[in-house]
Image: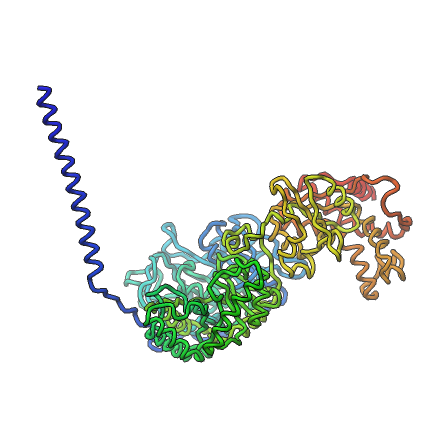
Amino acid sequence: MVSVWKFVRNCRQLELHRLILLLIAFSLISMCFLAYYVTNSPKIKEALPLPISDCNNQHRTSLPSQSLRRFVPAVDTSRTDPVVLVFAESIYSQLGQEIVAILESSRFKYRIEIAPGKGDVPTLTDKDRGRYALIVYENVLKYVNLDAWNRELLDKYCIEYSVGIIGFFKANENSLLSAQLKGFPLYLHSNLGLKDYHINPNAPLLYVTRANEVEQGPLPGDDWTVFQSNHSTYEPVLLASTKSAEFIPHLSTHKALHATVVQDLGLHDGIQRVFFGNNLNFWLHKLIFVDAIAYLTGKRLCLPLDRYLLVDIDDIFVGKEGTRMKVADVEALLNTQNKLKTLVPNFTFNLGFSGKFYHTGANEEDEGDDMLLKHRKEFWWFPHMWSHMQPHLFHNETVLAEQMKLNKQFALDHGIPIDMGYAVAPHHSGVYPVHKQLYEAWKSIWGIRVTSTEEYPHLKPARYRRGFIHNGIMISIFMTHLSNYGNDRLGLYTFESLVKFVQCWTNLKLQTLPPVKLGAKYFELFPEEKDPLWQNPCDDKRHKDIWSKEKTCDRLPKFLIIGPQKTGTTALHFFLSLHPGVTSNFPSPVTYEEIQFFNGANYNKGIDWYMEFFPIPSNASTDFMFEKSANYFESEVVPKRAMALLPRAKIIAILINPVERAYSWYQRAHHDSAALNYTFYQVITARPDAPREVRVLQNRCLLPGWYATHIERWLTFYQPSQMVEGGKSKCLGKSKGRKYPEMDSSSRTFLTNYYREHNIELSKQLNKLGQTLPSWLREELQHTSWS
């Protein structure tokens, strides 16, 4: 029996092996058949749909005849700061983030608060000025349900300072189908399905949005809210029809259109508002939201309607064989450019070239290269690198310049215009983070005046991108790429459709400027961006990838001694330098032991210049490098700049009695004409109409002693755990240090009174930070309490 069982088991195993082999063979045959079918079957390439038609073909529906332009009170914004106060449901809410994204994209200042269910609203005024020009509620119910005290306070502020309110109502499963908005002659009907969106041409707030267009078809979702009111203060902005003819309580069903966004003209209670019956997911709501901001702030928070468009086509000769442009592709490019010229004044494609790759494709593609050059005068041109190499890989400026000369000679040989003053580095390498060899070579070979990058300050999110000027070259953020791959018309289709869409739905005026003029226009619109804000390249992987491998962030200091001046910072610098594990910067030939990088003209020289003052540490984890510049303390720009480059640094300040510090500074200024001609008391008590040199010396004596004010500025950017404050200790012998005549009693009394409130604020600040009060401050507080 045992032998029979073994025989049967072997037979079964043999059958299983054969079955597995048959399955493998079948799979291989199927794959071969599929491969043959795919490679030999005819390619069917679907044509792209035609770009959207002209606007005048859009369907229009007559709006109710009662929608007429009415008188709207003027908005006086002269008494408020241009800041938007946003009340969000939470820091993670989607609508709150979308509101902030639009404000940031428009470069509008804002403050975000979690909407209080009950409790006080934040302080709205500063002396006789309003802190906010506009208030936005993510959930309008949080506004209407405020307790009586805060509601009255907020409404009074809005009336007195001409501040408008924007509110959103997003229905959910718990929302009442019909209800009156508390305190308003306005009814809400919720959880509706809508279709065919209309824009009311009589709505006063329309600015960017173009009226009379209709978005046909159903609107996404069945959670829409419409507004109903017979009060003359409400003007519909967006209107839609219900998807079906279902009965809506209290809503006249014979009415074809219902308002989903309404504008409160302020005729009811003196406050202008805009209410949205949904969130910002629908694209048209974003346009109306931008218009509402502009209108309610009297066009104070808005951008001009003139918009500028430049389309670069990078790497025009670069590409693998089979992907490059043929004659038909060039013809399509020219055809699209001619169409866009009729829509956008002066529109011209801007072609970037690397000459080494000319005529390196198939015969048909080489013919495409020739046709591009045949029509070269119909395009604008800008240089890449000759071999498309990344500039940050070139550490020798001469070698980098030779590559540029090859590309320039190619342009001259083929009649390509070279006077645009614009260039783009492959992968934006060397533009930011700055590779100084690139800037110098660009200027010497091409006379470059403007370039562009997507990397400043970071690639994402795109709304944070900014421009800056470095070494005489404007770096702007216009960087609109179009694919140069042959047989791919998606880019052409996209741009033509985009331009027509903008012209159908908005009042924006598109135009094209050549790169240098466009760069100048950019900084005319945003002059505050001219000065760069240097980031730490090692904190962004993309930046590190396009940064020279010869550079290292280990050469950046780990702590800063920021001053203030005349408090013993030089002595601290000397004693720290004696420690074998602590290294100071190399001395400057101009400012000695201080670099003074973050607060003056040196900052524009870039971080390469800054890092040259520090050695390469032998052990980056144990070696501590530091910089001491005592005029950093009271500077308004240094904290932000230092945080951007040195986000993890420790910040050290020495706080001595500000009375003694002021007197020490006066004694130091022995070469100052004001110090020679005026006594200390005359300087510190000088009136605003005193000679300029006296007022300058007065400020240098008095203002650094506003310790609490300056520390608060640093705490805006650095964590309290990174800040180290200390009083002056008796570390020097009696024979050391400068000896000055005794301060007169009148000056001491004046300064004691002058700094009293500042010292009280400092004590509160240090107590809040959990730091010990210096002995001089404790003594001053005791004297204050006695007095």
- In the image, 677: left or right of 560? right
Residue 787 higher or lower than 493, as above or below: above
In percent of width and height, residue 238 lies at: 40, 67
Q: Position of residue 479 (x, y in %)?
A: 48, 66
**103 over 334 or under it: above or below:** above
Along the line of sight, which residue is nearer the eye, 601 or 585?
A: 585
Q: Is residue 103 visible?
A: no
Identified at 90% across, 51% down, the residue is: 744
Q: 24 or 60: which is nearer to us?
A: 24
Q: Camera-side residue: 29 or 747?
A: 29
Q: Residue at x 82, y 64 (%)?
A: 693
- For residue 708, side relative to residue 78 (left or right): right
Q: Residue at x 87, y 56 (%)?
A: 680
Instruction: Determine if residue 686 is in view.
Output: yes
Q: Residue furthest top?
A: 1
Is 148 displayed left or right of 352 in the figure? right
Query: How was this image coloured?
Result: rainbow
- Residue 313 falls in image quadrant: bottom left
Q: Position of residue 783 (x, y in %)?
A: 82, 42
Q: What is the x, y in percent for residue 25?
A: 17, 45
The N terminus sits in image quarter: top left
